[in-house]
Image (spheres, rainbow, N blue to C red):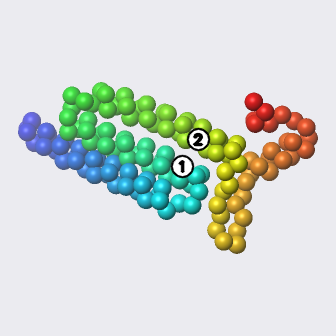
Amino acid sequence: MGEFLQALLQWVGFGALVIGVIFCAIAVLGLFRLPDVYTRLHASAKVTTMGLAGLLLGAALIMPSTAPKAIALTIFMVITSPVSTHAIAMAAYRSRVPMVSRPGQKARDDLGEHLQSTLANGEKTIFDV
């Protein structure tokens, strides 16, 4: 029974590796295909987090001795990736990197509208740091 379970874990681990590689490939396609920095950040952060989680899960299942490190690295990545993505997006927004919209449509900037009304009232904004 031990050999069967080990073979099953290897096949499931191989499947997780394949899923992780597919997610990472989708992230690369998103970086090439999407029009601006904000949508590219979405593709790279969300999809790469899932891709790395799949790769680390596969590595943990195929090589059980690496499981604690893979689990710790997955938890670290799931926590830090959204934070770093938000910081990059906020830096791009503060630098006034434009949002690209489809022809004939205007990109909606909810934060910009809020900032305009805040500035009109003389209140401090998040950019007054």
In which quarter of the view is residue 25 placed?
bottom left
- Indicate the amino acid at tag 2: Ile
Q: Nearer the viewer, residue 4 or 94?
A: 94
Q: Position of residue 101 (x, y in %)?
A: 65, 64
Q: Work out whether residue 37 or residue 43 is closer to the camera in this orientation and state it.
A: 37
Query: Relative to residue 22, is residue 12 drawn left or right?
Result: left
Q: Amino acid at mark 1?
A: Leu
Q: Label 2 near label 1: C-beta < 8 Å?
A: yes
Along the polypeptide, which appears first: circle 1 or circle 2?
A: 1
Tag count in the figure?
Answer: 2
Question: Which residue sits at x=57%, y=61%?
Answer: 35
Q: Which mark is residue 88?
A: 2
Q: Nearer the viewer, residue 93 or 15?
A: 93
Instruction: Give the class, few, some or many, for how many residues have Cα within 10 Å of label 1's Cα (few <14, many ≥20).
Output: some
x and y percent of residue 77 in the render? 43, 35
Residue at 64% of width from left, 61% of height from top? 100
Quadrant position of residue 126:
top right
Residue 105 position within the rendered picture, expressed as x and y whole percent measured from the top left: 70, 68
Q: Mark 2 Cα within 10 Å, few/some/many (few <14, many 20+)?
A: some
Report the side of 97 relative to 5 (left or right). Answer: right
Q: Give the SS element for disc 1.
A: helix
Q: On the image, which quarter does residue 128 sit in? A: top right
Residue at numbered disc 1: 41
Classify 28 as above or below 13.
below
The N terminus appears in which quarter of the rendering? top left
Which residue ends up furthest to the right in the rendered image?
121
Residue at position x 32%, y 32% in the image: 70
